Amino acid sequence: MVGSTRQHILDVTADLLRSTDVESVSIRDVCQAAGITAPTLYHHFGDKRGLLEAVAAEGFARYLAEKHADGPSEDPFDDLVTGWDRHVRFGLTHPAFYVLMYGGTRSHEHPSAQEGLRVLHGMLVRLAEQGRLLTTPEEAVPTIHSACVGTTLALVAAPDAPAHADLSRRVRDAVLAAVVKQEQPAEQRTEALPGTARALLATLSAHQDPPLSPGEKLLLTELLSRLASTPAPGQAS
Amino acid sequence: MVGSTRQHILDVTADLLRSTDVESVSIRDVCQAAGITAPTLYHHFGDKRGLLEAVAAEGFARYLAEKHADGPSEDPFDDLVTGWDRHVRFGLTHPAFYVLMYGGTRSHEHPSAQEGLRVLHGMLVRLAEQGRLLTTPEEAVPTIHSACVGTTLALVAAPDAPAHADLSRRVRDAVLAAVVKQEQPAEQRTEALPGTARALLATLSAHQDPPLSPGEKLLLTELLSRLASTPAPGQAS
DNA sequence: TCCAACCATATAACGACGATATACGCCGAG
DNA sequence: CTCGGCGTATATCGTCGTTATATGGTTGGA
């Protein structure tokens, strides 16, 4: 059985890492918990870094497999949203892995992290092909990724901080809104009629010299007020 | 001279940290470079963590002093922008410090980092007092901060990546646009009158059942068309 | 003036860490 | 049966952060 002890070491390390910090887990701890001795571990992983990378790669592979499982959906924007959420959830589920991979300055060296970036890039290319991207995919990738990593690190550091409620959603919507063109379908545009009327009302009142007669302006204001007070139909969602 | 050796140790450590990684700098290295022995260092800083925190605090104090130097400007939004830029620049100038403070999960424990968050919170309170904040300051603080930290970490990891050009500005504008209301001055709002009228025209035509009589709708459309065709005065900037 | 208390620093060492040179046993191929 | 290679164990290295103990230099009071 070739891969038996190796997998056993990986599992034990993952268990230890789940309950402790990264630098608190020593080679000796892993060896004692796995029932082996140091040279065995070094024979399989060569290095402590190699062991941790193998553990992180296994966890990240599960995360990527989950991402690939449901495959690309109909709307690449939805893929972007669920991809962001999955990234954050992975960080919160495996805090030690996550800080190990993205905390330092070596995240771009991780093959698994690069794979994640490639998936993100693919989504953005699909979005660009539909003409819904405000920048190039190459520019959008680090924009989204760096914000997502920063948010996840903040959440991992203090998951239960009251100010962190909905933090991921807020940063996600902010960054995505700046990167992808938000086109609203026709029915939503219908619901937006009162808002648009209100906007014109405000603009009109601020305008010092509109090209209208006093009667025309008064009439327009009345009509706009009627539209602005229209109750929005079917406020679903 | 009480603080002489202490300051000397701080300077030497900062020098070593400028050219090497954090975990590559050992207590023994610092002691040899400073011409002292271990107990002296431990007498002054108690701990390796204490030494690194003292060094980071000193660097961050300089950064905060620089921030306080020019003081709050007229527009708190400008303070937000320059504060973001200064944060990123500090990270790029002192990469080892920055990763030490914000890389792991212990950044919120750093007194200096908390001071920075307090400054950010103050700016947002000023902005909220002017009614220009779309959320509460307490929600906006982690939103801005986590995105800024993520961006800075990405830039520190790979400062010269071509895709990272203007990365900080892009994320900054995206997050700030989602948090603070962008109110355009009166003259711009005047120029925006035709555009707003055009928007309402489009919304009106897409609406299948506006609460208007046919005559009212026709009249409104005529007035809006007049406004929409108004030439924008003084297209400066 | 002398002494005692105190503070800063040095000597030497401890325990734990990551890592390794060497040796032992097992097991399939000849 | 033997023999080479692979996996594992023994024992150990050098370095790390840290500290118990001791020493010198300064200072305030008797």
Image (tube, coloured by chain):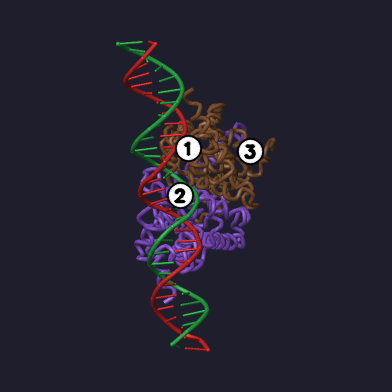
Chain colours: A purple, B brown, C red, D green
x and y percent of residue A126 in the render? 58, 63
Chain letter of the residue beneath label 2 in the structure image: A
Q: Residues within 10 Å of mark 2 (few under 14, many from 20)?
A: many
Q: How crowded is mark 3: few (under 14 residues within 10 Å), some or many (20 or more)?
A: some
User: How far apart are the two marked residues, 3 and 1, measured between alpha carbons?
Assistant: 24 Å
User: Which secondary structure, mark 1?
Assistant: loop
Residue of label 2: A153
Q: Depth check: A123 or B38 in front? A: B38
The reply to whether residue A45 is in sight is yes
Residue A117 vs B31, above or below: the answer is below
Q: Which amino acid does label 1 sit on?
A: Leu
User: Which secondary structure, mark 3?
Assistant: helix
Q: What residue type is labelled 2?
A: Leu
Q: Of the residues tagged 2 and 3, which is closer to the observer?
A: 2
Residue of label 1: B133
Q: Who's the residue at 47% across and 54% down the image?
A: A100
